[in-house]
Amino acid sequence: MKKVGIVMGSDSDLPVVEKAIDTLKEYGVPYEVHVYSAHRTPVQARDFAVHARERGFGVIIAAAGKAAHLAGAMAAGTTLPVIGIPVKSSTLDGLDALLSTVQMPSGMPVATVAIDGAANAALLAVQILSVEDSALADRLDTQREKNVEKILAADIKISEKY
């Protein structure tokens, strides 16, 4: 199975990123986690992106706040799918990070999840990897079925009460 590379611009992003790590663990997907800044460690960040495919990665998740150029920097260095997580900061409540992540120029796509949406970033990575892994696809299907059951149980409870 291919690995997921998780890169964050600062170790202060770790509380958000941990939700992605937990989700990947739940699905048994191997991952590596690194701190590389698009602006403060551009050489290391580019090296990671350029060599990600040969190092066994299938998807890169990049989390950053404020200017949030990290996902774009990763995408510039690889043709692997890149998923950006805009991280909420005290500045503009993460809107700046969202716009910096989602507004990529033509030819340089970055899939973008909600502000602090690390669990969905990991789920999207799992879905991408499941294209080539039927066991992983089965795990996703099973989880979706559990989600349906949970919502329908809540529906029954609320309907009976009101």
Image (tube, rainbow, N blue to C red):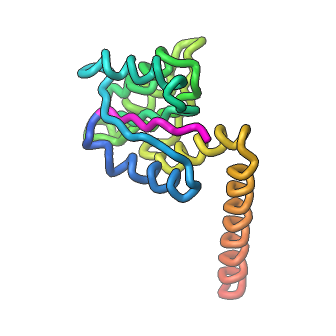
- The quarter holding residue 154 reads bottom right
Indicate the quadrant containing the N terminus: top left, top right, bottom left or bottom right: top right
- The quarter holding residue 70 reads top left
**Most foreground residue, 159 or 100:** 100
Q: Main secondary structure of the magenta part?
A: strand
**Most foreground residue, 38 or 55:** 55
What residue do we see at 51% from left, 38% from top?
4
**Most foreground residue, 92 or 141:** 141
Say if 35 sits above or below 38 in the image. Answer: below
Task: Indicate left or right for 105 with 97 as reference.
Answer: right
Q: x, y (%) of residue 106? A: 59, 12
Task: Indicate left or right for 125 with 144 as reference.
Answer: left
Q: x, y (%) of residue 98? A: 44, 33
Q: Is any atom of residue 65 visible in this view?
A: no
Task: Indicate left or right for 94 with 144 as reference.
Answer: left
Say if 7 sits above or below 39 in the image. Answer: below
> Is residue 7 highlighted in magenta?
yes
Task: Indicate left or right for 142 with 69 as reference.
Answer: right
Say if 16 sits above or below 3 in the image. Answer: below
Q: x, y (%) of residue 143? A: 67, 61
What residue do we see at 72% from left, 38% from top?
132
Number of on-image labels: 0
Say if 126 sits above or below 58 in the image. Answer: below
> Is residue 129 highlighted in magenta?
no
Q: x, y (%) of residue 142? A: 72, 62
- The quarter holding residue 71 reads top left
State the residue lying farthest toward the bottom: 161
Q: Is any atom of residue 56 visible in this view?
A: yes
Magenta-highlighted residues: 1-9
